Amino acid sequence: MTSLRGPPPGEQGREGAEMVRAALSPPFLLLLLSWAPRSEAAPDQDEIQCLPGLAKQPSFRQYSGYLRGSGSKHLHYWFVESQKDPKSSPVVLWLNGGPGCSSLDGLLTEHGPFLIQPDGATLEYNPYSWNLIANVLYLESPAGVGFSYSDDKSYATNDTEVAQSNFEALKDFFRLFPEYKDHELFLTGESYAGIYIPTLAVLVMQDPSMNLQGLAVGNGLSCYEQNDNSLVYFAYYHGLLGNRLWSSLQTHCCSQNKCNFYDNKDPECVTNLQEVSHIVGSSGLNVYNLYAPCAGGVPSHLRYEKDTVVVQDLGNTFTRLSPKRMWHQALLRSAGKVRLDPPCTNTTAASTYLNNPLVRKALHIPNQLPRWDVCNFLVNIQYHRLYQTMCSQYLKLLAAQKYRILLYNGDVDMACNFMGDEWFVDSLNQKMEVQRRPWLVDYGDGGEQIAGFVKEFSHITFLTIKGVLPISRAISSFFYSGALRTYAASSREKARCACSLHIGNGWKTFWTTVQRRQATARKWRSRAAAKTQVLDPHGTARKDGRKGRGPTASGVYRVGRSCHTQDGGAAAARSLRGGTSACAARSPGPGHKMAAAALGRARRRRQNGRSSRTCSRVPSSPLRAVADARNPLGSRPLHC
């Protein structure tokens, strides 16, 4: 009972094209079969048999259907099996934010197996897809978002109801796919998922049937007060606020060396904050990447398309300003059509593709459902924000001392800026294990570059990345020495990251404990003087005088160069030794036998006359390599 075909209700909506991108990196497991094994319990009626827009159908299995949420809610899911080994790979849940925005935006423009092209009809394989190493579940939540719906057509909801509905949907997923119930589970998301993920995690941690291992939030909204307060400082020190405005803010919003830009009642302070809100959110700046252009040019805060009012404000900053609340309520009471678009984001391609009748049929979407939009205005405007901070939720998770938690931020995102999240992590008062320090990425000919900054506490890590997630070029794959596994951006325009599969010991070291990190650090310091054998991207061994990876004496973390090769050699590089980047793997190390075996397989393929590269349009994966070897035209028909 997976796909609910009953008539849906109500209007639906659009997704918050807000960020994200990222990727993971477990150890290399070569599949011996050209197809992922068919799951005995997987709902066959939900399997996507042929996805329009692809030049070659994938070898991995994927499913689209509905999960039961709370009450009469039916949440649409799109599940893609791992290209490595579905039987051993972890399960990763992904939620986009909003509130009221679709997770299919993350799938099609950030880190899914396919990236939508500007024509709105073509999909290209994503070489940095998360499903290269994980089974990924994209869930459209809450009801009313994307293709999700409720029988009662009621889409007013709140944080607690959404957490419970997501929890019920997750339980339904494991009922439909029981073969995954014992797999490691990671909860991930971006933006308003800073609320979705920890509230859901608190429910999941109380259910022993789910193997929760950790959670990660990118550019997340963790605390309204810290987000608003930090945003004013961010804007001023990035040259967005003039001296006159800054001086007035200091005079009317601050006292005794403490500023309140969150819920200040001073009339002059409120007036100044309205001006700040306009500059940041309505003047034409890209709130997801301060230094990127605004798609379509400088927009007006409110515009009209035929008979539709288009709003570009997700409502997550300066929520206490009464004029802003009054304006939103006036829109809600208006009789006309209103559409919510994420600011400075062009979602036409994704919307065109997902509203194609052939695509909807392939995804098993009932005909009665309205069109797909990236974000739903009604869900967003009626959403009741119960929590002003996630402090208590994180403290509950940290008290268990068994979950790995990562908060990561691009350093030019203004929607949920890095300062606010760093302040939030600091406010949890956890034991500091690693002081704030830079981490580096080796780009080969480009040399080592600073990729961002990281600091570790016991069981929680805060990481910054140069550039925005995923709205800009995601300059690097954010990983350092086996101590941390995070996300790497991977979308075409938004985040074409040089390397996105990476580091260490698989998901079992997903943000490893401090003891593991310290052991890794000691090991690499002892080997720092020794020459190491390096596997180049083509899978051949060479001698290199570079020092081993891991933290240097100065405490700077280094990450290997990018994985551009689409072949078994690159896969060998990604297999790495335990606890290091999967890019340009270096041995010796705990995983050197695995890397050597992968090298042997790559060498044998070359001796058998196979090219060392597969088509650059196809994701690098052992599954794809074997499938192409057996059937150069692909495992399935080229056209639906």
Image: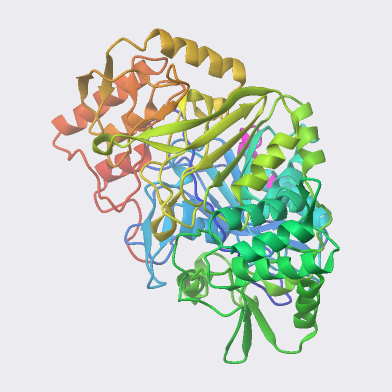
Which region is colored magenta?
Answer: 175-185
Q: Is residue 477 above or below residue 300?
A: above
The colour scheme applied to this rendered structure is rainbow
Q: Which residue is drawn at 60% across and 15% down?
A: 515
- Picture quadrant where residue 396 is located: top right
Q: Which quarter of the rendering shows the C terminus?
A: bottom left
Q: Is residue 609 left or right of residue 356?
A: left
Q: Is residue 111 above or below residue 157?
A: above
Of residues 189 and 230, the one nearer the viewer is: 230
Q: Where is residue 589 in the image (x, y as percent from the top left)?
A: 39, 15
Of residues 235 and 252, the one nearer the viewer is: 252
Q: Residue at x 84, y 64 (%)?
A: 266
Q: Which residue is drawn at 53% across and 12% down?
A: 519
Residue 146 lies in the magenta stretch: no
Q: Position of residue 216 (x, y in %)?
A: 62, 41
Q: Can residue 8 be seen in this view?
A: no
Q: In this view, does 553 lie above or below 12?
A: above
Q: Is residue 300 left or right of residue 632?
A: right
